[in-house]
Amino acid sequence: MNMPEFYIIDVFSEEKYAGNQLAVFRNTESLTDIEMQRIAREMNFSETTFILSEEPRDGGYDVRIFTPKTELPFAGHPTLGTGFVIQQEIAKRNIDTVILNLKVGQITVTLNYIKDKLDVLWMRQISPTFGPTHEKEQFVDILGLERDDILDQFPIQEVSTGMFDFIVPLKTLDAVKKAHVSKEKFYRLIEQTQSKAVLIFSPETYDNRNDLNVRFFADYLGVPEDPATGSANGCLAAYLVKHKYFGKEDIDIRVEQGYELERPSLLLLRAKSSSGEIEVNVGGRVVMIARGKFV
């Protein structure tokens, strides 16, 4: 197998060795599905992306995303990270947008610059879909929490902006810290639901500059806990707007994640409701760590 070049980057990171790690491979059209899956397992990050060709098709770059266990139709930090690699290593110039052709459809990454230096990357997610709500008592058992840890005024709900996740509102940072997923109980639930992962959040944070603290568990998808999750935070953004969590139908907030994993991450969420539709944008910074090639 003639192995392509790859890059290791940190996504949703303000500095090196923070955020969520990602491997991005380029020129991978010749790789089989099995080879991509094996590489993703060998890299052992939460996701690995494969840019099939450096020639755009239908205005976008064909990209596939794999966890160590399976292929995903969409994921947030791989989308932003791949857009970063295309701008830095393929286009090699300041461009305003990069379009990725993913399994879920075309996703646009917008690139912002400060004095010609790349700053924040944003991705517009597909319009959210809201699934059923769930009993709080069920998630008390699943997350190893007390009933009083879960907020009463907001529901536990399934939400998708490409992939469905459970969104669970908690009261305190202590509740977020002590949460842990009972795989047996959670797996019994997800046999019957579209959602296969759970995001928990609280208004208390480690860093007082931030608005929410988040943890995300996706063991079923091969990610016991993720340090930064763009897709799930997109679901969270839609949820916050729909239920007017901050008392209004638009948000522009900072979300921290990954502190429990010692990979502190910062995600920027912008969302608004207009004419019955919710528009969701997730942003963050990306840092290059390494370049390499399998042998």
Image: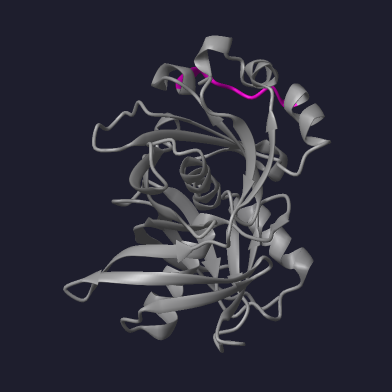
Residue 59 appears left or right of 290: right
Residue 15 appears left or right of 77: left
Residue 180 appears left or right of 177: right
Q: Is residue 146 visible?
A: no
> Which residue corresponds to the image point at 47% horizontal and 23% vertical from the top-left?
176
Outermost residue to the front = 275
Estimate the x, y position of residue 255 in percent, counting from the top left: 38, 41
Residue 161 vs residue 28, the one in the foreground: 161
> Which residue corresponds to the image point at 53% horizontal and 20% vertical from the top-left?
152
Residue 52 appears left or right of 98: right
Estimate the x, y position of residue 114 in percent, counting from the top left: 20, 69
Residue 76 vs residue 82, the one in the foreground: 76
On screen, 55 above or below 114?
below
* Tally of numbered tags: 0
Residue 168 vs residue 38, the one in the foreground: 168
On screen, 130 above or below 8?
above
Estimate the x, y position of residue 28 in percent, counting from the top left: 64, 77
The answer to which quarter of the image holds residue 66 is bottom right
Q: Is residue 279 visible?
A: yes
On screen, 132 above or below 85?
above
> Which residue corresponds to the image point at 68% horizontal and 61% vertical from the top-left?
73
Q: Which color scheme does this rendered protein use?
A: one colour
| Quarter of the rendering occupied by the C terminus | bottom right
| Quarter of the rendering occupied by the N terminus | bottom right
Magenta region includes residue 274: no
Outermost residue to the left = 115
Estimate the x, y position of residue 257 in percent, counting from the top left: 42, 38
Magenta-colored span: 177-183
